[in-house]
Amino acid sequence: MPQAANPAERAAIDALLGPPASGWDGGTRTDLDGHVAFGGLHGAAADRHLLLPALWEIQDQIGHISKGAMNYICERLSVPPADAYGVASFYSLLATSDRSSRIAHVCDDIACRNAGATEILEELSDRADVHTGPCLGQCERAPAAFFQLAGQRDRVVAPATTSAIQDVLDLNRVAEPTPVAESTPQLRNGAQDLSVMARVGRVDPLSLDSYLAHGGYIALRRALTMGPQAVVTEVKESKLRGRGGAAFPMGIKWEAVAAEPAADKYVVCNADESEPGTFKDRVLIEGDPFAIVEAMTIAGYAVGAGTGYFYIRGEYPDAQSSFEEAVQSARRAGLLGADIEGSGFGFDIEVRRGAGAYICGEETALFNSIEGFRGEPRQKPPFPTQAGLFGKPTVINNVETLINVLAIVTAGGDTFAGTGSAESTGTKVFCLSGHVHRPGVYEVEFGASLGELLAMAGGVVGDFKAALVGGAAGSFLMGDRLDLPLTFEATRNAGASLGSGVIMAFNSDTDFVDLVLRIGAFFRDESCGQCVPCRVGTMRQEESLLRLAAGSGDEGSLLADVAQVMSDSSICGFGHAASWAVQSALRSGLIGGSS
């Protein structure tokens, strides 16, 4: 007999999913007619997207997903238990067995390990409730710890100390999150006028009135008078490229989705910011959430979508809370819903929380995650503009990219295209961390050099050795590249990539072998395992790096072969980029061997 959920677990799930249909017998029916009659096969198609929220609902309450709760969720959503277990076990933040109700995930990724995380983990090594984890997106205030607290809201502490982590776990102090308005890091402005970051630190992020007083919703009102096609035209003329790493022209995406005749279309904001060294989107969500709500609404209007999904990484509890409050305020004010501003246009936003999977930053893996499946990338074509979320035409952009739409609509696409460079228009928000005097987010007009960005951050602590540009999926740039303009075209010509805007500086005291080993471990751990070239290639890459670190000889040729296979045959960009930082470290002589 399958284990049953207890009354509290059933009540929590019913509160999320709604009460069972009248006549439903608790999931004990075995005949096909009865199964279909009570929402079985139909429910699986209609409601499976609620699987991840339901799993979170239980874990948030008791600290893990019990077998009884899992069985009840499967009954309610008509998902086979083995299938649901495969989904739950895919995510690092979900626990499918009993564990402590209070867990600390201490980041030991690149920025945090250079800021003392390794020592913290050694001091807490005897605690079963302390886990190591990848980048938490708190690099400017490293080291960081993320707490999962049953019955309470999750919490981030940064910078973290051994005693602070023990205090939270041992209930020596109230585990309440830092207020969002007080958690915004210092902003550094390299441009004369901020654009994307204009309101961060100046506006009350939880007040719609404050947002309106600082120019909020001017862009949406202008868009509603322009008409959808005119909005798409302005976005195309702006030459805005995506800021998440792929740098795809945004206007082409919007135009393609707008041209699709489908009745149902979607807008998705990708806030699954998990690239090591990246934290700009977190700052934007925490400091200016209404801007994202407004920009998503404009996107929906432009392409003819009635629903938007905001997918945020599970390690961002403050940012999620900030955004959810903005959505609720916008609904109350009639700025989301069936008839926005009396225009006849209807649009609303649903929030989905990720659960610890870097791969879900890939757009099709993100779609699968929302739909209630494992976050594994899909083969392309078809592309999201034709068959994206739920198989419908979908626009997907990240947080920074979307906020640029507000300036494009208010000032015009031509004006936006007149800033920056020919292929890199507008401004770019960079995340500076590592061995710099003033880590933080810096917004500059495209064209500023690597050396200029480092100078804005107060310069390097000690003697500059290298900068990791683009994150773990980026490249190391040495001192001879300080004059390199940080544009899409200049970095591409230099064999590098801007990626998500990471600039992590390292001085001559850095242990680059340890650093590159951590990058290798990151890609091995975060591979979804769907395709052999990536699943095996990331393992072989890490093994080769371990041998190289042990001084067992030249591993350069093998690493180059593995990199080539992953690049040529992996399903998605994860496998293509998994070797970039390693290969650049070899070419630059930061680690031994030759390629």
Image: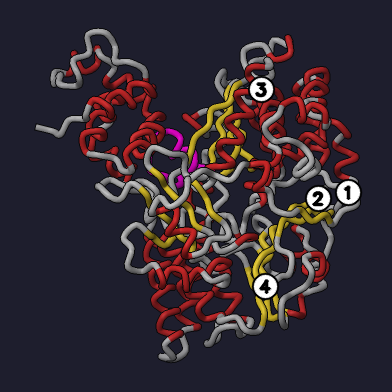
Label 3 or label 4, whichever comes before in sequence order:
3
Residue 471 in picture, x, y percent from top left:
61, 63
Neighbours of disc 3 within 10 Å: few (<14), some (14-19), many (20+): some
Q: Are marks 3 and 4 in contact (CB under 8 Å)?
A: no
Q: Residue at x 53, y 61 (%)?
A: 160
Residue labelled with disc 1: 419
Q: Amino acid at mark 4?
A: His
Left or right of 127 on screen, residue 198: right
User: Tag 4's secondary structure?
Assistant: loop
Any mark on residue 330, and which? Answer: 3
Identity of the amino acid at label 1? Thr
Q: Which residues are magenta?
A: 363-378
List the residue tagged with mark 2.
427
Q: Residue at point 82% right, 44% down?
A: 195
Q: Residues within 10 Å of mark 2 (few under 14, many from 20)?
A: many
Question: Farthest front residue?
Answer: 172
First in sequence: mark 2 vs mark 4: 2
Give the number of the mark in front: 3 or 2.
3
Magenta stretch encompasses residue 270: no
Q: Which residue is mark 4?
A: 435
Who comes first in sequence, dot 2 or dot 1?
1
Q: Which of the pair 469/155 is nearer the observer?
A: 155
Residue 368 is inside the magenta segment: yes
Q: Earlier in the sequence, mark 3 or mark 1?
A: 3
Q: In the picture, residue 211 is in which quadrant?
A: top right
What amino acid type is highlighted by mark number 2?
Thr
Label 1 near label 2: C-beta < 8 Å? yes
Q: Marks 3/1: CA distance?
A: 31 Å
Mark 3 or 2 closer to N-term? 3
Viewport quadrant of the C terminus: bottom right
| Label 1 element class | loop
